[in-house]
Amino acid sequence: MSPKISIIIPTYNRYLYLEKAIKSIQNQDFTDYEVLVVDDGSTDNTKRAMTLVCREDERIKYFYQKNSGRSAARNLGINNAANKWLLFLDSDDMLADNALSFLASKIEDYPEAAMIGGTYIVIDEYDAPTKISGFEIKKGLREGKVSDPYLSLIRNYYLPMGSYIVHRSIVRASGGFASELEPCEDYDFCLRMARVAKLAYFYTPVAQFRKHGGNTPLDVFYATTLRVAYKNLAEINDGHSPVENKNAVIAEWKHFIADDFYNRKEFKDAFYNYVSAAFYDPKKLISKTFWKQVFKCILPKTLKDKLKSSLSGKLRFFPM
């Protein structure tokens, strides 16, 4: 008996992209699904377009709510989902060909897994592919069962919305999406699922992630990501969220926070968190990159400028 999948799509004023997202689902070779489109108070043509779509395909259901954010929209979808497996797809993204059949096939192969995911293709606003995500492969993540899902996701977010299915029991036990963490509520959600769920991961593309002018600005995204880091660190330290390899997990979050301070040139706070990360995980001390950033934090700016000036003066004598 094939598993049934509920696909939840939050949307706000994106009916042109939404139609493409739905079409990518209808074109799947796997048909045992329902689609729950949650309209977060759109003022464009979304409602009219969805009325026609739902009339033509009874597997598609339309819900409308006052503008409350995409977390509230996804949570409404969760509460109305009829199936055991959930997939969250943003309305400006699409599924890759045969994505549902591939994910469904792995449910039987990995019965202990409550999360099953794949990689994704980045596309532009005209649906043209720009690249296939591969950074998780470079990080040494192997296909199949992931040994420590939560730790692997801290600084390597390889499971964005649309690229995995999750069992409904895990979602309800761990809670839904947190509106106060938008636009990084999806990252926080994925982390909470990974704390308690077994994960099976594969290099097969299952989602098409669209880059366009309406995406969240990077500075806003990074600022909220830091809030997710502090939230997770606090939850782990207070003992209410037990995790495997606790010291290694704390070290990764400390390193994550240190890198953020470093990138913003707040070197004092960066240095403190780098040292703290090494305290929890001494293996970081053998990393050349780690030491490079630590020394940049503690060298006075005047000395850095002198070294830079000295090196640039010497380089003038050597032809390039």
Image: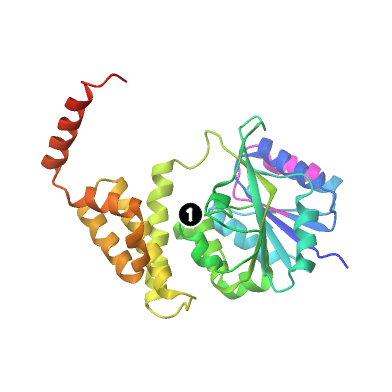
Tell me what residue is drawn at x 58 percent, y 69 percent.
147
Question: Can residue 83 be seen in this snapshot?
Answer: no
Q: Nearer the viewer, residue 243 or 305?
A: 305
Q: In the rendered image, which residue does mark 1 sit on?
A: 184
Residue 312 appears anywhere in the view: yes
Secondary structure under badge 1?
loop
Q: Name above or below for residue 301 compared with residue 159.
A: above
| Residue at (12, 36) in percent of width and height | 306
Q: In the figure, 161 relative to 22: above or below?
A: below
The residue closer to the viewer here, 251 or 72, is 251
Residue found at the very far top of the displayed protein:
319
Whether residue 220 sits left or right of residue 159 in the image: it is left
Image quarter where the C terminus lies is top left
Q: Position of residue 63 (x, y in %)?
A: 69, 54
The percent coordinates of residue 150 (x first, y second) are 52, 66
Q: Residue 312 falls in which quadrant of the image?
A: top left
Q: Is residue 48 magenta?
A: yes
**Residue under the point 60% across and 50% down:** 40
Residue located at (70% from left, 64% from top): 80
Name the image quarter holding the N terminus.
bottom right
Three-letter amino acid code of the residue under disc 1: Cys
Please tell me whether residue 108 belongs to the stretch shown in magenta: no
274 and 68: which is toward the camera: 274
Q: Position of residue 22 (x, y in %)?
A: 75, 44
Q: Is residue 71 left or right of residue 206?
A: left
Find residue 191 and report its horizontal and vertical position in percent. 52, 64
Looking at the image, residue 127 lies above or below residue 220: above
Q: Which residues are magenta?
A: 36-53
